[in-house]
Image (cartoon, helix red, strand yellow):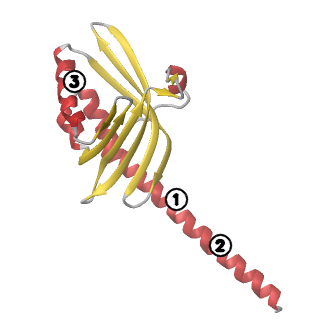
Amino acid sequence: MTNSKIVIRVCFLFGFILSSFSTLAQTSSIEIQQHINKTVWASFQKAYEARDADALNAIYATHVIRVTPNGIDTKDKFKRKNIESFKASKESKTEIKLDFWFDSRHTNEDTSYEVGFYKIGLTTNGKNQYIYGQFHIVLKKIEGVWKVTQDWDTTTINGHKISEEDFSKKEPLKF
């Protein structure tokens, strides 16, 4: 066998091995995301719709960076606002429906960066109101449990108010 044939075979074998590792990493990432869906996102949606601030806040890490168009919260004020907001929703008998889907997800063994769109439906006294937005979430595995460590969302992109048209580009997730 000539040297060039040996080089070609070694290169082919090396390429095959690298592509196998890439496939394994993708499978692992997908499996991790499926686990996150079950342990974080299904619980998030359930807590939000039930207006259960304690359950919702438990999904977040002890210290979170929360960013909105109103500024940056590094003191977890949003957790107290969740309690107040959900209490007010219960008192006014406002029903909440949360739908969302992912635009992109980048995940490894202990960190996941997830971007998506949401739709919040509020029903009070038979009247419906909808809020649309985009979120960027960082999840970290802390002591074996996935927790939200950074939460950023907005209702506009480049000055364009996010609408039903934007949200309807994909189907919402079902858990």
From the image, tell me which residue sits under label 3: 85
Disc 3 from disc 1: Cα separation: 39 Å
Labelled disc at residue 129 = none
Amino acid type, label 1 = Gln
Per the image, label 3 sits on a secondary structure element best described as helix
Q: In the image, 167: left or right of 70?
A: right
From the image, tell me which residue sits under label 1: 26
Image quadrant where residue 64 sits = top left
Q: In the image, 161: left or right of 96?
A: right
Q: Quadrant of the C terminus?
A: top left
Q: Along the polypeptide, which appears first: circle 3 or circle 2?
A: 2
Labelled disc at residue 16 = 2
**Residue for point 80% across, 91% down:** 3
Q: Could you say where residue 94 lies in the image, as x and y percent from the top left?
A: 25, 16
Dot 3 crowding, Cα within 10 Å, few <14, some 14–19, many 20+: some
**Residue for point 71% across, 79% down:** 11
Dot 1 crowding, Cα within 10 Å, few <14, some 14–19, many 20+: some
